[in-house]
């Protein structure tokens, strides 16, 4: 009887050893979010959005957009994309939308594009032409005297006295004043450079903008979103051009939706 029990126990042990262990599913890797600022701004314009994304477990990179030329700026951002192991969500504000449209080309790890009050030009289009295609932009009259460059080009700034109403009307005056001081200029050449084949034709795209935008009219932003077959478009009533600064929670939500979409 004891021998039978020993045999049964041995078979039980062998049987349990023969059953392969079921590995726990690997945790899904969250994409890295790369935030690309536009003209008259810098990476700190994303601070509110970045804080919310980081709190939700996302790695965030605020790219320093040179604002010199679409192609050159796209190379700068593409180099950052290449340095990231794993999936990426590219987010562009204003002129930064033209940059991410070019930078994502050929980058296999870019999962989606998010346009925040941003240009999404088609091949051959320029930011300058798109901003004037629909009525409503008052940027031209808000610009300061251009800074002449050694190569014959021009740098554009927004007049500091007009910055609040033109660029950031839904932010407190004191905050907008500091943004005006820290604004980064854009080269005229960047605004007039024709875009190449855009990545939004292949990648899922998402759009968010405000109806109070005085740089790029809401009608132009809505047109570009529809043309790009935006998976989700969020229009915030009354929001200014810096919707990421005035409504960071809404912008972060859309980015996270783009990051988690299949």
Image: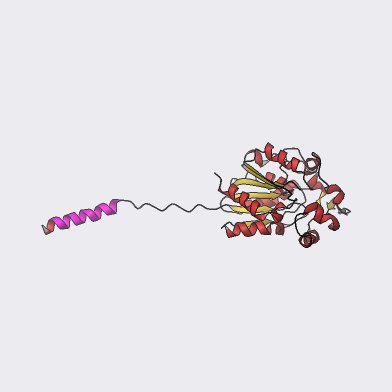
> In which quarter of the view is residue 231 placed?
top right
Bounds of the magenta segment: 4-23
Give the quadrant of the N terminus.
bottom left
* Left or right of 148 in this view: 33: left
Residue 249 image position (x, y, % from top left): 64, 54
Q: Magenta part mainly helix, strand or loop?
A: helix
Q: Is residue 16 magenta?
A: yes
Residue 178 image position (x, y, % from top left): 78, 62
* Left or right of 259 in this view: 71: right
At a point 71% along the width and 59% down the height, the residue shown is: 44
Give the quadrant of the C terminus.
top right
At a point 48% along the width and 54% down the height, the residue shown is: 27
Residue ranking furthest to the front = 237
* Left or right of 138 in this view: 109: left
Which residue is nearer to you in this view: 114 or 105?
114
Q: Against 211, is 44 above or below?
A: below
């Amino acid at each position: 009887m004891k021998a039978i029990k020993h045999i049964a126990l041995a078979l039980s042990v062998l049987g349990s050893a023969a059953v392969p262990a079921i590995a726990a599913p690997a945790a899904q890797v969250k994409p890295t979010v790369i935030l690309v600022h536009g003209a008259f701004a810098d990476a700190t314009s994303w601070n509110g959005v970045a804080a919310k994304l980081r709190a939700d477990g996302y790695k965030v990179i605020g790219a320093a957009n040179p604002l010199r030329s679409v192609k050159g700026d796209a190379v700068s951002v593409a180099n950052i994309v290449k340095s990231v192991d794993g999936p990426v969500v590219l987010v562009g504000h204003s002129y930064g939308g033209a940059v991410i449209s070019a930078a994502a080309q050929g980058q296999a790890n870019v999962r989606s594009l998010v346009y925040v009050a941003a240009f999404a030009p088609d091949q051959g289009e320029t930011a300058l032409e798109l901003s004037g295609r629909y009525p409503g932009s008052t940027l031209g009259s808000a610009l300061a005297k251009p800074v002449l460059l050694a190569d014959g080009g021009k740098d554009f700034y927004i007049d500091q006295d007009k910055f609040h109403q033109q660029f950031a009307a839904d932010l407190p005056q004191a905050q907008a004043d500091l943004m005006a001081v820290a604004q980064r200029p854009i080269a005229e050449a960047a605004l007039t450079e024709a875009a190449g084949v855009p990545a939004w034709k292949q990648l899922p795209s998402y759009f968010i903008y405000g109806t109070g935008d005085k740089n790029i009219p809401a009608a132009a932003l809505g047109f570009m979103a529809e043309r790009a077959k935006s998976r989700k478009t969020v229009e915030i009533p009354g929001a200014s051009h810096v919707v990421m600064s005035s409504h960071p929670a809404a912008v972060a939500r859309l980015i996270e939706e783009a990051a988690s979409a299949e």
